[in-house]
Image (cartoon, rainbow, N blue to C red):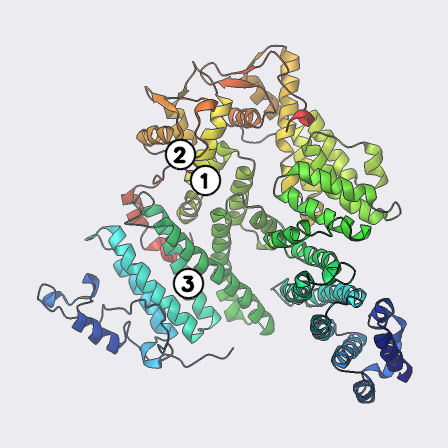
Amino acid sequence: MDSYIMQLRRIWLNQDGDTLADLLSLRHSHISISQLGSEAAITKAMEHLPSPFDDLVLYHMKTVHAAAKGDPCTAYEYQSSAVQSLTKILQLQKEENWMLPVMNRMCLELRLLAVRAENSKAGKNPKPGEVLEKCTECLMGCFRVCAADNRSSEDDTKRWGMLALVNQLLKVYFRINKLHLCKPLIRAIESSALKDQFSLAQQITYKFFVGRKAMFDGDYKAADEYLTYAFERCHKRSTKNKRLILTYLVPAKMLLGYMPKSTVLEKYELTEFWELAEAVRKGDLRSLEKVMSKHETFFVGAGIYLIVEKLKPIAYRNLFKKVYLALNTHQIPVESLLTALIMHGVEDVDMDETECLVANLIYDGKIKGYISHQHKKLVISKQNPFPRLSSLT
Amino acid sequence: MEECGNGTCFAMCPEKERWMREREGLLHVFEMDEKTKNSRKPKADPSKIIKCFNRPAAGQLMADPSQLRPAPTLLLTTRYLLTKIVTRRDRDWAFIYDFIFDRLRAIRQDIIIQRIGVIQSIEILLPIVRFHVYASQRLCERNISEFDKKINNQHLLECLQRLLVLYEELDRLLYQKDRDVNTSMDMLSVTEDRQQMEAIYILLHLGNITVLNRVLSLPKRYRSRDIDLALKISISWHLKNYVRTCRLIQELSPLLACAVLCNMPKIRRHALAIMSSGYNSKMLTFPGIKLQEILLYNDINNIRADCGLFGLTFTNENVQFQKASFNEQQVLANSEMYFSIPVLQDFLPRILFECT
């Protein structure tokens, strides 16, 4: 116990950020010290540690104590106070950034505690996301200090801490479905001079979230770019992360007209997408609908249900192309398209809706031609009536 | 938070305000004593005058109990406005709306100042939300000087969001208490109302991804027929399937239809843009009567007006769609009522109180 506090004192004076991060982590061996939360230990810490560092340590000890008792909500509260005292310390430290490793670790663990607190309340608390939302306020406090530090030289600036915080915040915003809050954070990073110099791991995480955000905004090209960056640079052995990236990259690619290979999907156990791709390729709406309801929980959980929904127009296009090839005419009766839709399991569809689906495809450039309502015909261009999807901008 | 000093005003309007408004000649026609109506200084009918909305000003004491009405009085006042006044036929409805809008706003203010409890707040806010939804349809064709859609919509969302938060709080309260038979009976109707409100929220935010994702991830037990239908409509619009969207709208109950119809100018605008590409031709035309059916136009003359707005030619009741002439700058079509006034009048006041 004593040695722990002495060690803290020494490391604080040496300004050794990495070691200090360990000593204030909830996943380090010191947390097994049983008297850590005792009165004696607290008095000791107050005696030997300088202010305002003592506050931080005090809250840390209380966090460890609460966590050991199996009370994640209280542990979260204390960790949140600890991070707030850290914010104050960071603000006082002008022209130095050695505490950043401590900040990164504590903020990460703050978020993890918030998730645990949230889960422990699950079912009892019908207001999900409450703790996580509070957690973002705390993280924002740190972010403001870092982002505002633009007087220090590049070596000493706390702006190096921005991306790690942004990543934590993005994780939470995605989890609580508050995507509109991402925009100012992304802007802050994009306009930063350090943008391309942050650590690779942080950049990968960042690109992953920005890619997902682009996807929700309907910008699949940008999504493809960001997610591809993340996928290609992500470490070969972090299969779990690669799989996660693919969960978004695959549908983005599909929307751009690139269908995935079964080998990749099998390797990452994402065969749901294989079924999906097959149905889209064949224009088989019935099996598309079936795959969607079979894997609804997965798609909804990943937040891509509505993206997958957007594959339907591609399936319509493929189906209509098959009708065109079968009839071999440039004047396709809308009736034939309707028959094809009904044959492939589209429910309650009529001539009007068929024309509407076609009109949308023409509007999006997926079919070249026009509909004649009077003649009930789709008249398609003699040249390249169904352009490759990947050729569309 | 503790409840701060409960109001002691058991009339719809505090006495002090009544005197002041009588003296200053600030009485609304709906508040005057019939006998003195035509005199130079009309008197207030104490059973009709209602506290009006006052913007909180600096230095003004808002929490004077004698100026505040407790929850039962607020509920009574709401009911009076939304049964007796809302159904009047002697005045233009926009005039009636203005009066009710202002007095309801004062009621909401009293709720907030007194921190009225969850259940009572829900009871009062619920018909208020419905009133704003109904008004959005009934007055949609009016000029901005008579009816401001934006302001109505802003107040509607404010009340609706507050209401949905209150329902969440109610859930939490019920978890803490042991449920007895009585509360679970109450809960049944609360759930129905709540599902109607959730459906309205979805329909007001047609095609909104954030709202859709939230609903999709709700446990199945929170789903009802209304919510499922609202979801289907919103997803159809997500894919810009205007034919299906409009077809499904016709299956909605009147109140939910009123909610989704706020989006009609947007739906028609996008549908016409898409059709201008799909039916793009210098020779061919599209029958107006078909367009009327698909996009739920009541009056074919309104198609003419919308075509004019978007730069499309409308001749002999037919539309000529041309991609190049479509005016992309115009983001909304004109507003048109879906229900006729007699039908809408008939909905009152039932539509504001019953969950159908």
Q: Position of residue A144 (x, y in %)?
A: 65, 64
Q: Earlier in the sequence, mark 1 or mark 2?
A: 1
Q: Residue at x 66, y 14 (%)?
A: A325
Q: What is the number of the mark on residue A294?
A: none
Label 2: which secondary element: loop
Label 3: which secondary element: helix
Q: What residue sits right under mark 3 in the picture?
A: B125
Q: Position of residue A132 (x, y in %)?
A: 66, 63
Q: What is the number of the mark on residue B296?
A: 2
Label 1: which secondary element: helix
Check if mark 1's residue and mark 2's residue have beta carbons within 8 Å. Answer: yes
Q: CA distance from mark 1 to mark 2?
A: 9 Å
Co-location on one chain, circles 1 and 3:
yes
Q: Residue at x 85, y 34 (%)?
A: A263
Q: Position of residue A157 (x, y in %)?
A: 74, 62
The amino acid type found where label 3 is placed reads Leu
What's the chain of the residue with tag 1? Answer: B
Co-location on one chain, circles 1 and 2:
yes
The amino acid type found where label 2 is placed reads Leu
